[in-house]
Each structure stands twice: as C-alpha cells, then as structure tokens.
Amino acid sequence: MPYVYAGKYLRIDLSTGQWQAVPIADEDVRRYLLGSGYAAKLCYEELDPSIAPLDPRNTLYAFNGLLSGTFAPTGCRSSFCGRSPLTGIWNDANMGGHWGAELRFSGYDGVAVTGRAAEPVYLWIDGRKGTVALRPASHLWGLDHFAFHDAVLRETDPKAVVACIGPGGEHLVRFAGVMTGGQAHARTAGRGGMGALMGSKNLKAIVVRGQERPEYYDASAFRQTVKESNKSIQENSLSMSKMGTPGGLINAEKTGDMPLGNWRMGDRPDLAVQISGQRIAETIFVKHTFCFACPIGCGKYVEVKEGPYAGTAGHGPEYETLAGFGGMLLNDDLNSIAAMNDLCNRYGLDTISTTSAIAFAFEAYERGLLSKEDAGGLKLTWGNAEAALALVKRIAYREGLGDLLADGVRAAAKRLGPGADKFAAHVKGMEMPYHDPRAFVSIAAHYATASRGACHMEGATYWEGYGINVPGLAGELPYDKHDSRGQGRVAAHYQNYVGLYNPLGLCRFIIKGLAGPDMVADLVNAALGWGWTAQDVFLTGERLHTLKRLINVRLGVTRADDTLPERFLTEPRPAGGAAGVLPNLPLMLDEYYQYRGWDPQTGIPTAERLAVLGLSGP
C-alpha cells in the first residue's frame, strides 16, 4: 500500500451499472498529485471536445486531495471536476467538510462517473464491507440537500458522509453545486455547475463510509510537523477563527474590494457594517464549526430568532454570499441574507453565480430590458430582499425568469439582446467572484487566466494587498495593488502556489495563516518521503495550471478569451478606496505569458516550457 493515499479509484458507468477499481500509478501521483490535479490528467487523456458538457458520455471526476484524510492541517478537501455546463471549459469545484476524508477511509482516492442511469440513483460506497452499490433514488429525487442528507443516512449508515445535489442540480441549473454536511455543516463544491453534471446523469449522491486510515512514511516526523504547523496557523488566523470570512467584509468595502450594485458604485460603509461578520457575531451567531483536521474553525452556525426570517438556522453566510446578497443587491438586511443563503444550501446553488444572476436581472429591470411581467410580478429594485429571495427558488426550479437566469449571466445577456452584455459580469462564462480587480489590479490578470473562468481562489493575490505576507510567497516579486506594472508575473507566481492546495487536499485558508511553500514541502516529505523543496512546490503547481490550460486550449480557448468584462476595464469606481483605478490588462497579460513561457499571441504554452514541465502539447 502506498503512503497516505489509497492507490485506486472507482470508475462507474451509470448506463450499464458496472464499476471497477482502477489503480493509480505512484509516478502519476508524484507528477499530478490527486484532487483536481489527477482529475485534470484523466480529463486531458479522455476529453472529446465534440461532446457537449451534459452529454452522458462526459465524465464527472470526484477526487479527494493527496493529504485528505490525514491529520495535516485542513487535510479534508475534495474536488468535483469535469467540463463545466456553465462555461463549456475545464472546471474544478472544491469543498471542505468531511466527505474527502471519509472517501479516503473507504479505501478509494476518487470516483470517475460516466453514462446516465435510466432512473435516479445514488452511489453507496461502504469501505467497511468492501461493497459498492448503485441504489434507487427515485423516492428521494426532489428532496433538498438537508432532507436528502438525513433520509439517506437512515438508509445507509448514520455515520456515513454525503455529497449530493439539490433541486438545482436536478433541474440542471448550470451553476448548481454539490453539497455536503447537511444543515449542521453545509459545504459546497459550488462553482461551474458540477451539480448539474451530476443531475444530467441521474446521480443524486455519492455516499461514503470507511474505516481505513492512512499510513505515513515517517509518522513521528509528520506528527511533529503538523503540531508545529497548527500552532503557527492558529496564531496567525485568530480573526478567521473568531469571525470567519465575514470578518473581513468591512475592510473589503473600505479598500474598494467589495462589489456594490452590480459593480457600479464606489462605497457604502453603512451597508458593510450592517452585514459584516462583526454584526453576525452580535446578532445571529450560535457556534463555530470545523471541517476535518481543521485548526481554524472558520465555519459559523447561525440562527435567526426574530422577524420575518425567524427560524432560519444552519451554516451562516460566508464573505462571498454576504457580498453577493448584500453588496451586489444593495441589501442591508442581514437576516434576509441568512435566509437566502439557507435556500442556496438547500437547493444546491452556488451563491456567487446565483447572486450575480440576480444582480444582472436587477440592472436589466432598471434599464427596461426586463418588464414586471418578465419578472413574474416581482419588483426587481435595488435592496428588495423579498424579490431576491423569490428569485432564488425560481432559479432552482427554473420557473419563469428563473429559467433564463439558471443558464448564467452570459447566456441570459445573449438572450436579452444588444446592450445586456455590457453589465453581465463574467469571464469565459463564469460569474465574477466578489473581489474587485480595480481594487487589487493583479486580480485582473488571474481572473482573466484562471483555469475555470473568473476565480479568486486560483491566485488570491489580493491577500498580499491586505498585508498577508506569506513566507516564501509574498514579497518574492514587486507588488502594488493599484499599479499594473509587474502584476502579471505576480498573478502567475501566486497561481503556481495557491493552485497546488486543491490537489494536495488542503484548505487555502491556511495560506492566510502564513503557511508557505517550505511548510507544505515539510508536510509532504514527512507523509510520503519525497524530498520536496519549495522549488518542487512551485514547479508542480505550474505543471498542473499548465495542464488545465492545455485542456482549455483543446476546447478552443486562446488569448482572445483571456479578458474581463468591459465595466472593469473602462469604468472606474467613482468613490471609495479604489476610486479612479483601472487595471492595464494587456500589459499584465504580456508579462504573464512571458513569465509562464506561453506564446504571447495565442496564449498557448510553448513546446519549450512544456518540455520543462514534462507535458505534451494540445
């Protein structure tokens, strides 16, 4: 048995009901790790660009990271990957919780699913008995995430861990996510529509239970490294532990980072205070929640006890959700945001894409491109929480205007006609996450070049802008949050490091706790005995980012697609911490391609750089 990982994955054909265990070669793990790295390796080998994303022949890859299930700090992450129903290109959606660790305990590193079941099913992997079964799920189809979670545990095992879709995935909402944790600890593989990919296969869930535990190259050294790492991460993550991601919302508004009114306004400090992590702590906070092996505990369980949304209880809204249902819609009602977040967790919807679609609808209504009749009688005016709440359900069930929005803002803008694309905030079809590239211009470069479309977590250069100085990462290249010069190189540098975390199965939030490349190398070496250095960390990250680019090149992506919506390149914020700032994207892209060794005209990796990385061309 290999150290740490199981060394095999399940390949399921839902059309035939057949499955087999497939070995994972050690040399492949050294090159691609697991998680989204190994999934990208399989996708690159198996991809048929002529097949539409929701064609049954396309594959859903669900893999836990290399260190998932170990006691490495946050060793819990799992990635759901494939061709996105939203963007049409590569996608990896990552989640925490306990599913990835339990999948490892069941004796497998991942699952690759093809075909389509004739009737709804769920996959039940019981590692204690060594059994794999496709079970009927017609009687469970239609249940939301919370109801299904509890029902399927009664059918399988009360200690099993569930990854499932809600009504959003069943109705093929193109930004539906995969959910885990139930009401108590809801977590989402949210971006890019992997829930729709599952729904297209009539696959309601993958349920796992195990008892196997990883073995280590040097268990004593690993334990000591983890102890030291946890201490450092905890000391540098006190604010995350106390208030989670919402704790930074007030400062995000102050710097001009938080979006307002579909990215048009400059500042609203009053609104930020009303929906902040500090306000959550004062009003609806109940307790902290932790993912597997997490030393931080950024999750917050909340309960609304009064007002029209009383009774809302569960995992509280994160920064992106607050910025979306709050700032994007100019809604300062925190309790309503908790209620909308609860619906998204029940229905299985990505809150970033959901809120972006609703904000797009609000602006279209304001501009007269949507009538009140088009809106099904809803008054889509800024700050109207009830209208937004109604749209969440309509999106999940594709009712009325919700059917238009369920395909994402790119598709909705195309259907609304000329002019709508001017305020559809997306990159390559992926709705923009809620960090403004006019506040930290390096974000423009990594939004434009991220593997799955607009993604704040593939590079996270804004962390350096907030003064998070990670040893061996921050300060390696000149950084200026408002000057575009040199920031294309910064974006690539951060992508090479931050993009390694999903394949390793580690949460990127420990980077905010100052987990640098030396710490990562030490963890890997103690766990697997590889002899990694910080240079190996960056080189592996570059290999995986480049591999995902090769997948996208095969799907038609070129430099022409590496861009941002017009609003971010021509309309500066009128006030606030980023007033008057615009990114010089062409300058940064030239720097970026040169730093990476990609052709500056096409954006395709050169043969020379591919040879260094041990990859073959598209």
Image (cartoon, rainbow, N blue to C red):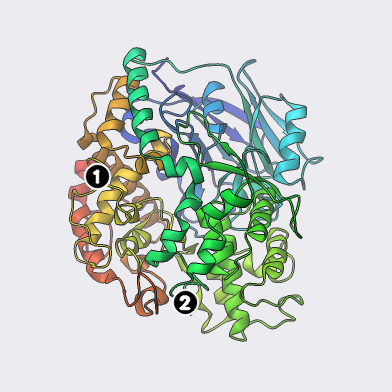
Tell me if I can see residue 52 in this picture. Answer: no
**Mark 1 highlights which residue?**
473
Question: Local crowd at mark 1 within 10 Å, few (<14), some, or many (≥20)?
Answer: many
Q: Measuring from the top left, give residue 137's x and y in whole percent.
A: 76, 38
Residue at image point 60% right, 29% down: 19
Q: Measuring from the top left, give residue 176's x and y in whole percent.
A: 61, 53
Q: Do the residues labelled 2 and 1 touch (CB within 8 Å)?
A: no
Q: Measuring from the top left, give residue 289's x and y in whole percent.
A: 57, 36
Q: Measuring from the top left, give residue 10's x and y in whole percent.
A: 55, 29
Give the side of residue 102 with respect to residue 576, left or right. right
Q: Which disc is residue 264 wearing?
A: 2
Q: Which disc is residue 558 wearing?
A: none
> Tag 1: residue type?
Leu
Toward the viewer: 277 or 113? 277
> Tag 2: residue type?
Arg
Give the side of residue 485 with respect to residue 163, left or right. left
Toward the viewer: 595 or 323? 323
Name above or below for residue 416 compared with residue 73.
below
Question: Local crowd at mark 2 within 10 Å, few (<14), some, or many (≥20)?
Answer: some
Give the side of residue 351 with respect to residue 240, left or right. right
Instruction: Give the quadrant of the N terminus.
Output: top left
Seen from this angle, which residue lies furthest right? Answer: 139
Label 2 to label 1: alpha-carbon separation:
33 Å
Provide the secondary structure element on which disc 2 rests. Answer: loop
Q: In which quarter of the image is residue 501?
A: top left
Residue at image point 69% right, 49% down: 346
Seen from this angle, which residue lies furthest front? Answer: 282
Toward the viewer: 42 or 180? 180
Q: Earlier along the polypeptide chain: callout 2 or callout 1?
A: 2
